[in-house]
Image: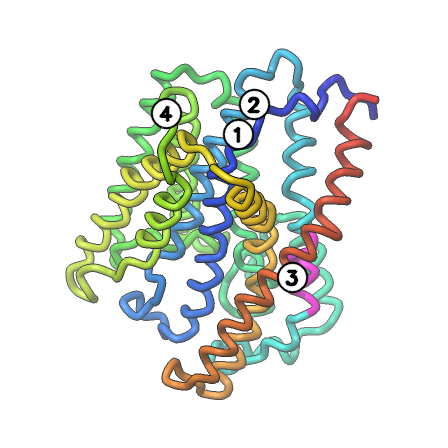
Amino acid sequence: MNQSFNLSQSRPHYEILDGLRGVAAIMVVFFHVFETFSNGDHTQQMINHGYLAVDFFFMLSGYVISYAYDNRWSQMTLKDFFLRRLVRLQPMIIIGSLVGALLFYFQYSEGLGWSSIATTPVWKLLLVMFIGMTVIPVGKSLDIRGWNEMHPLNGPAWSLFFEYIANIAYALFLRKASKLVLGILVLISAGVTIHYAFTNPNGDLIGGWSIDDAVQMRIGFTRLAFPFLMGIFLARTATLKYTKNAFLITSALLIFLFAFPRLGGNTAHWQNAFYECFTLIIMFPIVILLGAGGKVIGEKANRLCKFLGDISYPIYITHFPLVYVYMAWAVNGKHTLNEPLTWWVGIATVIISIVFAYLFMKFYDIPVRRWLNNTLIVKK
């Protein structure tokens, strides 16, 4: 197909925002590794607020999409936009589902409630795998793991389901919204977020991965709405000039915000709700504006930000099948964080996740996207 929209006209990337996406993705891997030992107790989570990285990704997505596409609709059709987003997101979704299927039978664990893995027939596994490659959620009848995930082979794919919804909403409606309308939507979605955080019995914003649970679906849309809308709003209204050491400062801020201990314990949930709303509504916009307003100084820093940006999405969408294996190993063997072996295997899981992400990026994602771009999008 010959299209009138040329990829070579893309606006420059924000190198620091690319790097921050990588920092957040790596923190997600650590969060999931340590989640193994929390036993469902939110107060016992290490990297306690690591799940807020998803909300940060949604905000970054809104910011970058608005920055990249707002001024280009005179030369771009809806078809052009949707093709570009499919080319950007879909290849790694396919790999994530494939990796999940390849590792599925190594994840058996009665302690985690995954005993059905041993009796899942191959045909059913393959069916779930192919559905997962489309990012369409599955229902309870295909919950082959037992955690009620909309993507049982690769849990984090739930956020890509909502990412696609956000992309569709942007293309159809939000790109046309005035700053006033967008600001009102931001305020309304912030109010919905605050209301949910303070009325949720757990006092947090975690969740959104199940389509069969109305509460989980509400959480998913709540977590999507404010950050994505705020990202667009920031891209259209707010700017910062050069900030010295912006990447170092913003990376440290992100790590601090994700790793901060849970407040209020198991009783004063409002304290944790306040912290998470403050982080999402105040601190994440500050981090993004600092990153967008900063500059990367030096070739090494540029390479680091580029590397982190390049592997961020591959890490996020492929790491969890490896973590499933780690979880099963730790629970089946009754390993605890008091054992050095547990730490070594956990660190190895993180390192392997990064290595695999790099290999997938270099030898699959980049070549496939280049071919798809040349075939579907770039004018010949």
Mark 4–mark 3 distance (CA, rounded to whole Å):
37 Å
Q: Could you tell me the amino acid type at mark 1?
A: Ile
The first of marks 4 and 3 along the sequence is 4
The first of marks 2 and 4 along the sequence is 2
Q: Could you tell me the amino acid type at mark 2?
A: Tyr
Residue 249, how many percent across, how many down?
35, 44
Residue at the farthest top position: 74
Q: Could you tell me the amino acid type at mark 3?
A: Phe
Query: Is 292 part of what is drawn in magenta?
Result: no
The secondary structure making up most of the magenta span is helix
Count neighbours of disc 1 (C-alpha within 10 A) and say few if under 14, some if 14 to 19, many if 20 or more: many
Which residue is pictured at 59% across the width and 24% down the height? 11
Is the residue under label 4 in contact with that under label 2 (CB below 8 Å)?
no
Which residue is pictured at 68% across the width and 66% down the height? 101
Magenta part of the chain: 94-102
Which numbered circle lies on residue 65? Answer: 1
Which numbered mark, 4 or 1, is in the foreground of this view? Answer: 4
Label 4: which residue?
241
Is the residue under label 2 in contact with that under label 3 (CB below 8 Å)?
no
Is the residue under label 3 in contact with that under label 4 (CB below 8 Å)?
no
The first of marks 4 and 1 along the sequence is 1
